[in-house]
């Protein structure tokens, strides 16, 4: 992609992701471990995080979160929290996600940040640096910035994207 294509995608994406359509949106930054030590019998080796591993880890996080928020209705009726995920980093920057994530149940709003952090820490690649706060329009501008994204279009994790 060229810079002008990235700018065009960015412009349309910012117009499309409208906070007015989100219930209790939160801005979340979730960092990932960059390496894991894997014990394979008597041997131990270090495994580096890939973008595919990051996406799979986020999918697991969202599946667990959906079960915690919606209980059995998550599986039975396919209920999911709305999420717009952007993966950033690589090279000299730790891979991390910026999420716009909705809280679909009003009674959970106060406890939601802690629930997100606890659930993230339970994942295999979840690192302890997390930040969760109510989202505003500046968050969409920040998470769709061009810097820290080797390829802007592929930085959006469409496999884990979900709206209501």
Image (spheres, rainbow, N blue to C red):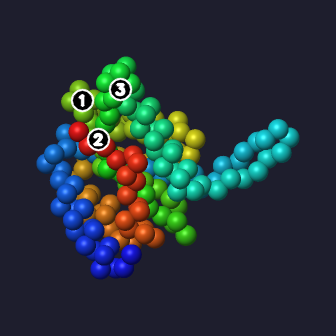
Between disc 1 and disc 3, the foreground one is: 3
Compute the Cα span from label 1 to label 3. Answer: 13 Å
Front in this rendered view, residue 87 or 133: 87
Compute the Cα span from label 3 to label 2. Answer: 13 Å
Q: Is residue 77 left or right of residue 44?
A: left
- Residue 56: in sight, yes or no? yes
Name the residue beneath numbered marker 3: 74
Earlier along the polypeptide chain: callout 1 or callout 3?
A: 3
Q: Secondary structure at mark 1?
A: loop
Q: Secondary structure at mark 2?
A: loop
Residue ID at (76%, 51%):
45
Name the residue beneath numbered marker 1: 105
Residue ID at (31%, 24%):
77
- In the rendered image, which quarter is residue 146 located in? bottom left
* Rendering coords of residue 149 (x, y %): 42, 68
Compute the Cα span from label 1 to label 2. Answer: 12 Å
Q: Residues within 10 Å of mark 2 (few under 14, many from 20)?
A: many
- What is the residue that sits farthest to the left in this orientation? 20
Q: Residues within 10 Å of mark 3 (few under 14, many from 20)?
A: some
Q: Quadrant of the N terminus?
A: bottom left
* Rendering coords of residue 132 (x, y %): 35, 46
From what the image shows, is residue 149 above or below residue 81? below
Name the residue beneath numbered marker 2: 82
Q: Quadrant of the C terminus?
A: top left
């Amino acid at each position: 992609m060229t810079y002008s294509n990235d700018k065009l995608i960015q412009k349309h994406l910012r117009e499309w992701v409208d906070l007015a359509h989100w219930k209790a949106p939160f801005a979340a930054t979730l960092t990932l471990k960059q390496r894991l030590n894997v014990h394979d019998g008597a041997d131990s080796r270090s495994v580096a995080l890939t973008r595919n591993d990051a996406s799979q880890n986020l999918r697991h996080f969202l599946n667990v979160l959906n079960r915690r928020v919606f209980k059995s209705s998550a599986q039975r009726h396919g209920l999911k929290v709305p999420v717009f995920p952007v993966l950033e980093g690589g090279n000299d920057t730790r891979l991390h996600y910026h999420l716009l994530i909705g809280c679909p149940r009003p009674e959970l709003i106060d406890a939601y940040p802690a629930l997100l952090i606890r659930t993230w820490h339970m994942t295999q690649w979840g690192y302890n640096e997390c930040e969760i706060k109510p989202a505003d329009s500046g968050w969409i501008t920040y998470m769709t910035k061009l810097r820290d994204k080797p390829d802007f279009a592929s930085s959006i994790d469409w496999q884990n994207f979900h709206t209501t």
